[in-house]
């Protein structure tokens, strides 16, 4: 066992973990952060996307010990760490634009979208589609997801979409 220390959704965490435990398993099994989903176990779908030190990562591709000393934000912590607990603008835009169908990809898609907008606050439609390329949705055809990212980008600039 290895003791790791990190911050998850704004709170300090210290836990003993097996060196081979994946970050997604740690978040779900040890911390109960079940909004981080396990979709494919091969890093293809992106359902497990979280932020590690401010960047989107597929948590099925990161060992928990690699996050030692880091800061992790999950879908549960996104609103909690944003502006007094209000929905993050990307979460609000996904709701407003009906950017989900079954909802399985939604947590990872939102986390990747937040990172995309942090990197590029005014992306084109093509840049959004390219930026979300590693996150799969099997239901929606992406139209409303792209629209939600555009809506969140416009809100970030104080515009109406």
Image: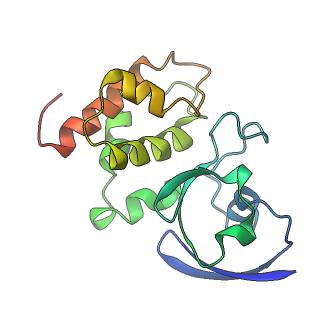
Residue drawn at point x = 57 percent, y = 73 percent: 70
Give the quadrant of residue 21: bottom right
Residue drawn at point x = 60 percent, y = 79 percent: 69
Residue 7 percent coordinates (x, y):
55, 76
Q: How is the image coloured?
A: rainbow
Locate residue 16 relative to residue 12 in the image: left or right.
right
Q: Quadrant of the N terminus?
A: bottom right
Residue drawn at point x = 52 percent, y = 24 percent: 101
Residue 116 percent coordinates (x, y):
40, 42
Q: Quadrant of the C terminus?
A: top left
Residue drawn at point x = 40 percent, y = 47 percent: 114
| Vertical comparison of 130 with 6: above or below | above
Residue 62 percent coordinates (x, y):
71, 57
In front: 27, or 6? 6
| Vertical comparison of 125 with 132: above or below | above
* Residue 98 in view (yes/no): no
Q: How many marks?
A: 0
* Residue 28 in view (yes/no): yes
In front: 93, or 130? 130
Give the quadrant of residue 32: bottom right
Residue 49 percent coordinates (x, y):
59, 48
């Amino acid at each position: 066992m290895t003791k790791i220390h990190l911050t998850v959704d704004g709170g300090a965490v210290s836990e003993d973990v097996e060196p081979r435990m994946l970050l997604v398993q740690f978040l779900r099994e040890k911390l109960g952060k079940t909004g981080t989903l396990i979709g494919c176990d091969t890093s293809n779908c992106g359902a497990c996307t979280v932020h590690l030190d401010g960047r989107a990562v597929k948590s099925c591709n990161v060992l928990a010990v690699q996050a030692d000393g880091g800061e992790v934000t999950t879908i549960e912590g996104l609103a909690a760490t944003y502006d007094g607990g209000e929905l993050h603008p990307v979460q609000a835009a996904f709701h407003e634009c009906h950017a989900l169908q079954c909802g399985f990809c939604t947590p990872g898609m939102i986390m990747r979208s937040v990172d995309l907008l942090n990197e590029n606050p005014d992306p084109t439609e093509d840049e959004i589609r390219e930026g979300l390329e590693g996150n799969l949705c099997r239901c929606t055809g992406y139209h409303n997801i792209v629209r939600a990212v555009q809506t969140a980008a416009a809100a970030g600039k104080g515009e109406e979409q």
